[in-house]
Image: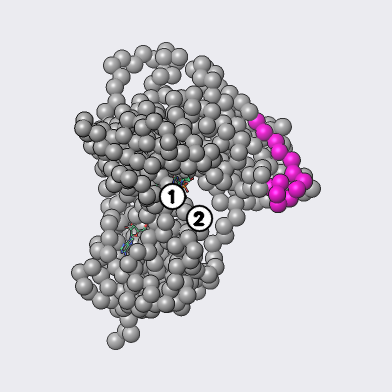
Amino acid sequence: MAQYDYDLFVIGAGSGGVRASRIAASHGAKVAVAEEHRIGGTCVIRGCVPKKLLVYGSHFAEELQDASHYGWSVEGMKFDWSVLRDAVLRDVTRIETAYTATLDNNKVDHFLERATITGPHGVKLASGREITAKYILIATGAWPVMPEFDGVEHCITSNEVFHLEKFPERVVIQGAGYIAMEFAGIFNALGAHVTVINRSETLLRGYDQALRDRLLQITMARGIEYKFNCPLTKVEKTADGGLLATPGKLEPLKADVVLIATGRKPKTDGLGLESAGIELGPRGEIPVDDYSKTACDSIYAVGDVTDRIQLTPIAIREGHAFADSVFGGNKRNTVYDCVPSAVFSQPPLAAVGLTEGEARNKYGNIKVYSADFRPMKNVFASRQERGLYKMVVDANSEKILGIHMIGPESPEILQAAAIAVRAGLTKADFDATVALHPSMAEELVLMR
Ligand SMILES: Cc1cc2nc3c(=O)[nH]c(=O)nc-3n(C[C@H](O)[C@H](O)[C@H](O)COP(=O)(O)OP(=O)(O)OC[C@H]3O[C@@H](n4cnc5c(N)ncnc54)[C@H](O)[C@@H]3O)c2cc1C
Ligand SMILES: NC(=O)c1ccc[n+]([C@@H]2O[C@H](COP(=O)([O-])OP(=O)(O)OC[C@H]3O[C@@H](n4cnc5c(N)ncnc54)[C@H](O)[C@@H]3O)[C@@H](O)[C@H]2O)c1
């Protein structure tokens, strides 16, 4: 009889957990996964996927507005939140079903219940069933961090935002990171009055300053209000069912929804880590080595719960590398340089590599090339918004250190440019490439 029930037990069927389960099974391992909410995890159920669909949905406002310049007249234009919301939620269910089928096709057993760790080789399901496994993979993701102030219980997080009963006419968002800027764009485009409240003057920390300044300027022109250096101190319910949100010492703001987007922390509460001798790191993360192994030899962790880079493709890569290393006879780790990222704000922002500031600190002698342009479609529609692309180059080797873009479709364009940066190409390689005209992407090879 086998020593353990499974070769691998995965806790969490999100981006990292599903990939690790599938690949380990394809290498011949007997695998089970437990999921306490829905198969697919944050990205599929309440993250990247429904968020991007809402971005698409909200873009029609701009397209319909511009349509008259192209000879189209759109009469009786009207937006129905419940139609968009329900269509998005249906698509989420479709993808959840596809993910479940992937597990079934790879003969991965799945338990739709919470699991906790009872020791180096033991897990316990919420139903009470105890299971043993040679290896355990923790892929439990992250959870929204809630600040402490009076009335925080009246606020929502990104978990709830996809399910709003009614379209909120007045939205207050606390935070100025990814989630705040993406939902500020969505609600603003759909016609809500949006106020972004932040504890500092910095939005989208980590992105190049010039792009952040451009986003601030464009979004203010689009009607988003900002209140900097004054986080919320109180949120109250009013007699008419609305909310009153007080930023710092400023006048209270009337709101229908207050969205808290102040970061996500590794989800480890009550997981039983102590039973396997695993202690949390300073950011609440599960510390792991380069191969995602925890302090316990039979337990690994991947994705947001390790707080390396909280992005889906990273969780997927870590899960895949773990499965190849432990079950595929191919020990390998995940490489974290040149990770492209994007903020699906309106307009979106995308980047890979070092910002101008980071490159200057690290290399000293750098060159910066840029293209500051008004996309053809904006000119035609009398839209004043300008795109900005920046290339940061090591002045000695001419190697590109980073590319930063804000403008329509910039995430789509940046993915291809990231290959060039990863491959170590130079500005001269871009200059030698013939422009593809007319496109916005051609600005990448025309920068001065
Ligand atoms: C609103 C939003 C938008 C985002 N947009 C993007 C984007 O555009 N691009 C991008 O790259 N990233 C985006 N992200 C981040 C991305 O979703 C995460 O980085 C990614 O999902 C992490 O994958 P994971 O496998 O670590 O965890 P998750 O996908 O969160 O999966 C963890 C799973 O574990 C389950 N679980 C937790 N504890 C237990 C337990 N004890 N027992 C059983 N199951 C458990 C959870 O229910 C969850 O399903 C977004 C996140 C949010 C919140
Ligand atoms: N497009 C994408 O790839 C995408 C989209 C959404 C989320 N994500 C991932 O999810 C993670 C979480 O997103 P997020 O927007 O919640 O986090 P974030 O780290 O991007 O932003 C957090 C914001 O909250 C502010 N803040 C933090 N603590 C606060 C407090 N106590 N009071 C007031 N303000 C406070 C910060 O200054 C910052 O502006 C991101 O780090 C990202 O990795 C990615």
Left or right of residue 286: residue 365 = right
Within 10 Å of disc 1 (Cα), the crowding (few <14, some 14-19, many 20+) is some
Residue 237: x and y, percent? 25, 37
Mark identifier at residue 309: 2
* Residue behind label 2 places its C-beta within 8 angstroms of ligand 2: yes
Q: Residue at x 43, y 36 (%)?
A: 249
* Residue behind label 1 places its C-beta within 8 angstroms of ligand 2: yes
Left or right of residue 131: residue 446 = right
Residue 62: x and y, percent? 42, 24
- The answer, for residue 172, to whether it is visible in the render is yes
Amino acid at dot 2: Ile
Specify whether residue 292 is painted magenta.
Answer: no
Extreme-bottom residue of the structure: 1
Q: Is residue 236 above or below residue 36?
A: above
Left or right of residue 51: residue 79 = left
Instruction: Look at the image and give the residue range highlighted in magenta.
Output: 359-371
Left or right of residue 156: residue 445 = right
The residue at which mark 1 appears reads as 263
Q: Earlier in the sequence, mark 2 or mark 1?
A: 1
Quadrant assignment for ligand 1:
bottom left
Amino acid at dot 1: Gly
Within 10 Å of disc 2 (Cα), the crowding (few <14, some 14-19, many 20+) is some
In this view, the residue in front, 21 or 290, is 290
Q: What is the secondary structure assignment of the residue under circle 1?
A: loop
Q: Residue at x 60, y 55 (%)?
A: 337
Q: What is the secondary structure assignment of the residue under circle 2?
A: loop
Q: Residue at x 28, y 16 (%)?
A: 76
